[in-house]
Structure formats: structure tokens, C-alpha cells
Image (cartoon, rainbow, N blue to C red):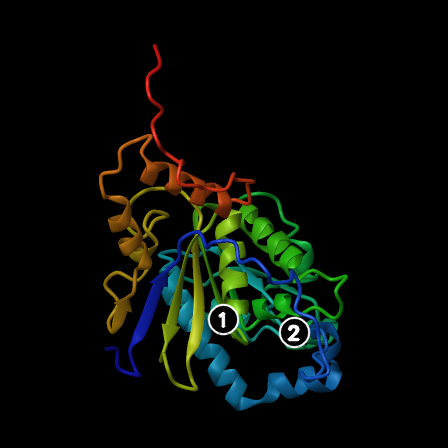
Amino acid sequence: MSRPEDTLFVPLHPAPIISGIPSYLPITSLTPPIRPPDLHYNDTEARKYTTSSRIQNIQASMTHRALELLSLDSPSLILDIGCGSGLSGEILSSIPPPTGPHMWVGMDIAASMLDIALQRDVEGDLMLADIGQGVPFRAGSFDAAVSISAIQWLCNAESSEVSSTGRLTRFFNGLYASLKRGGRAVCQFYPKNDLQRTMISGAAIKAGFGAGILEDDPGTKNAKLYLVLTVGGSTEEGAGGDITGVVRGMEDVDVVDARRKHKEKGRKDVKKGSKAWIMNKKEQMERKGKVVKNSSKYTGRKRKIQF
């Protein structure tokens, strides 16, 4: 059993297709209205957010945690996704040698937030952009990416005409392309429920990332989730190979790897062409959304040799 102060790291494997779940999360009369971030963070809210000492401390703590997971050993070019007023960017610029300081480019959809960042004279370059429309940079531009409390906004949809699944897909596909081979991204986020958590992690895996979720203080109200992503590259530990290499050696981190059970299941000797082999193949095809014929008592039965 993990203590409340422990950290859990859960490597993710390709998630099955969940049927019956809409591609958007509509707002109903039972849920309070959620305005998109560009409307929510007006001039008043943006200034209130930036000047709050509590938020500054939390933001700094989570940014340092993200940098620890990125494990950069030299000054790098980092994409700050949902950079806001530049609180996390300031941390990136203040890392001392030899691992820093880092150069960074920030994206955010809230013009008021970026306006405050300009007033604060942050060192990074800023871009007003909606990450739900993609990440518009040349392929392989960045060494790494960070995101603090931003990507959960992609799960919100104001109407059935706006697809949160499409926004997540465009974002992760663009992010994957913009990172160098062997690069990493760490996205801290606050999912409202398990469905949002599954949607976000599933979209990242579908884009091609190696993915795992690190949870600090699991089971408490202060729990924080970090989606740790790797982009291909070397098969060395922690360098684009097994995702668990990212947290190997960290103190108080328990790895809960569901893939091990999955692999152990697959190790059973199943003869090619047998009923078990055929059923397994049909399940794989169904998960991919293919049309599969119904199974029957004759499935996998060998035909008698006729003379």
C-alpha cells in the first residue's frame, strides 16, 4: 500500500475503444457553465491569478516537478503550452548552469494573460494561439515541452458541434511533430473524472507518444497528475524507450505497470490457427474498430479432410 505522501507512476498502454461515449462533453443544466479559457481569463481574472502568492507557489512547485521529470542536462528550447502570464516560463529562464537557463516559447489562448506576460517583461517568446487547433511549429523544433494546468481545457465543449476528441487529437499530433526525436513532454493537468483522464491519455498514445501518468500524493485532495510523454528515439532507459525509465531512481515512486500483466497473459503458448489464437485476433480487430464476424461454436474448428 502506498502512503499518502508517495507517488504513483502508471505506464499506459494503448487503451481499448470505449463505445457509447460521445466525442464531446456537453454542458447540461446539471453542471455549472464553464466558459472557455479565453473568456474566463479576462483582464480582472488574469491579474488576480498572476498576483496570487498561493498560485505563484503552486505554479513554481509544479514547474520544478515537470523539469525534474524532463531531466534535461543542458540548456534547451522548451515549448510552454498554456503559458498564461509567464509564471512557469520565469522558472525555465531562472534555472542556473550547467542545466540551464532554458529558452522557451509560450502558447496561450487568453489574450489578457499574454498581455500581463508582456507587462512583466518575461524572457520567452509569446504566441496567441488555440492549442486545440494544433501546434503550428516546424517538425522537430523543440527539445522538450511543459504544460501546467492547461490541457484539461481541451475536454470542454460548449456545444455538440465542438469535438473535444478532435481538439485533443490535433493538439497531440501537433505536439508530437514539433518535438525532436527522443524528446519529452510533461503536462500537469486536473481531469474532472476518469473519462477525461482516459480521453487525454488515449489521445496522446494514439498520436504515437510513449505515455505514463505520475500522481503525486495519490488519494488526497492535493493529488496532482503529470502526463509524461516520450517521442521515440533510443531504446536506452529513459531515452525514448520504456516509459518507466523516466522515473527510475526517483525516491518514493511506486510503479504500477498494468502492461506487465498484459505481457504475462500474452506469454501463454497459443498455437497459431487455434481457437484461442483466432479469438485473440478478433478481439484485436474489434479494438481497432474493424468489422468482425460473430463467433460461434464452429469458430476455430478444423474441417475434416475429404477424399
Residue at 50% of width from left, 45% of height from top? 286
Query: 68 and 105: which one is in front?
Result: 68
> Please, what secondary structure does the residue beneath circle 2 have?
helix
Q: In the displayed structure, does residue 192 sit left or right of residue 159?
A: left
Tell me the quarter of the picture where residue 159 sits: bottom right
* Residue 196 in view: yes
- Residue 272 at what x, y percent from top left? 31, 31
Q: Is residue 285 above or below residue 175?
A: above
Residue at 39% of width from left, 57% of height from top? 12
The residue type indicated by label 2 comes to: Ala
Label 1 or label 2, whichever lies nearer to me, is 1
Query: 94 and 219: which one is in front?
Result: 219
Q: Which residue is mark 2?
A: 117
Q: Which residue is mark 1?
A: 194
Task: Tell me the quarter of the image containing the C terminus.
Answer: top left
Q: Which of marks 2 and 1 precedes in the sequence? A: 2
